[in-house]
Image: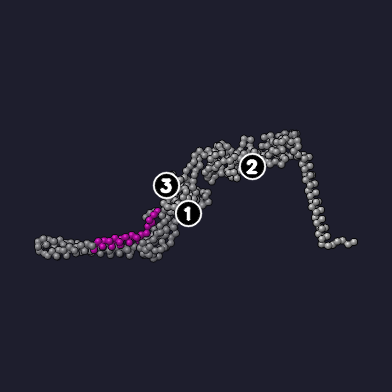
Amino acid sequence: MMPDLSPAATKKHAQGRLALQIAAVVAIAVALGAGLTFCAKTGPNADSGRPAGARSGSGGRGGGRPPTTVGTAKAVAGSIPIAISALGIVTPLATVNINARVSGALNVVMFHEGQMVRKGQLLAQIDPRPYELALQQATAQLQRDQASLHAAQLDLTRYQTLKAQDSIAGQTVDTQSALVRQDAATVSADQAGAASARLNLSFTRITSPVAGKVGLRLIDAGNQITANATTPIAIVTQVDPISVVFSLPEEDIPAISHRGEAGLAVTALDRAGGAVLATGALATLDNVIDTTTGTVKAKARFDNRAGTLFANQFVNVSLLVDTLQNQIIVPTTAVRHGPQGDYVWVLQPNQTVNSRPIKAGPATAETVSIASGLKAGETVITEGGDRLKDGGKVVLPGQNPALRGAASGRGGPGGWSGHRRGGRNPARADGGGSPGA
């Protein structure tokens, strides 16, 4: 008889084979589970006959986790600063373009690039000869007109005498009097011309209007320069003292105003925020708030004798607003954050840890104040807290986990000692210790 090779028969045959395979897999899994359960109950590490505490203890050998090595720190009472951080730009108190005020040939440049100069120090010299000649010409014109004025005054005196004797017409006296006033005005104009020529001659000596540091030389000696040209000879910046301009949120204005705007301590740190560059004081706040950012500009002044602050440098600014006294302080790494809020791990005398909810207060980069939940003198966990549970044993830095377990009596049955079951007691020199658990 030929086998049925129809599609329906083939499908029914395949379904039957699949059912047999599934049943075989289930049977093998059940058998393996029963075998593992039997071994666990009858094996040398079975929990039967062991104290309940040994079966459930955190240090037991029945799958228990060994103590965690942690870092600790004591909560201490101290002060903590309240500071506002911001990003600032170093701004010189004065930045001056050294320009020529008269035209001429630049004879000599008397400064070195990067040199510190005094106020009034000579920096460059323009050829003074044309201005010396102009001053001589103005002086000569003044002297000539002064002589004319003197002659007119003498004539006026004589005419006035003759008029008193009725020997001359009054019109002649009046005309001479007007001539004297005209000559006096001419002399005044000549005096102004001579002063202007003298001033232009002084402008041929280019001096520094402020004390500071000279930048790069932009015009060399020998060039013909014009008055108030676009390109200056050099730029001088006043670098000591120097200021830093930064922006503060408008909500911080009351705290600053309450303490007084000027005089609050300000620290300038490098761009990474690690190294202190200079310490100074708040100079003032701006008189308006920027409506686009909701901030107000502030300016702090720093002594910069060491030159650590550079013009247009970006720095981190820390403005000390207040200092809280008698605060409970712990390292920042001790405070942890959970679904229920902030908490710390507190070390107990038996070297176990318990979690304790706390309320954190103001903080710095390294420390944080605890408003409630902790007392001074208590020890908190700063490292290794991610592996801890309430009531868990811990090992302090420098302790040997095996020796700590033996010293606390946990090297016996159910204790975690790091030795094989039935091994020798390390405390027995003859190696004849009783079987360990």
Identify the secondary structure beneath mark 1: loop
Total numbered labels placed on residues in the image: 3
Residue at 42% x, 58% y is 235
Disc 3 residue type (three-letter): Ala
Q: Principal SS element in the magenta part? A: helix
Residue at 72% x, 40% y is 62
Within 10 Å of disc 2 (Cα), the crowding (few <14, some 14-19, many 20+) is many
Q: Is residue 37 left or right of residue 396?
A: right
Work out whether 51 lies above or below 137. Answer: above
Q: Which residue is identified by label 3? A: 262
Q: Is residue 361 left or right of residue 415?
A: left
Q: Position of residue 192 (x, y in %)?
A: 27, 61
Q: Position of residue 255 (x, y in %)?
A: 45, 45
Viewer-closest of 114 and 159 = 159
Q: CA distance from mark 1 to mark 2?
A: 45 Å
Work out whether 169 lies above or below 377. Answer: below
Residue at 80% x, 46% y is 31
Q: Which residue is identified by label 2? A: 388
Disc 1 residue type (three-letter): Thr
Asked if residue 173 shows in the view, the reply is yes
Viewer-closest of 135 and 210 = 210
Identify the image quadrant of the C terminus: top right
Q: Which residues are magenta?
A: 186-212
Q: Which residue is identified by label 1? A: 293
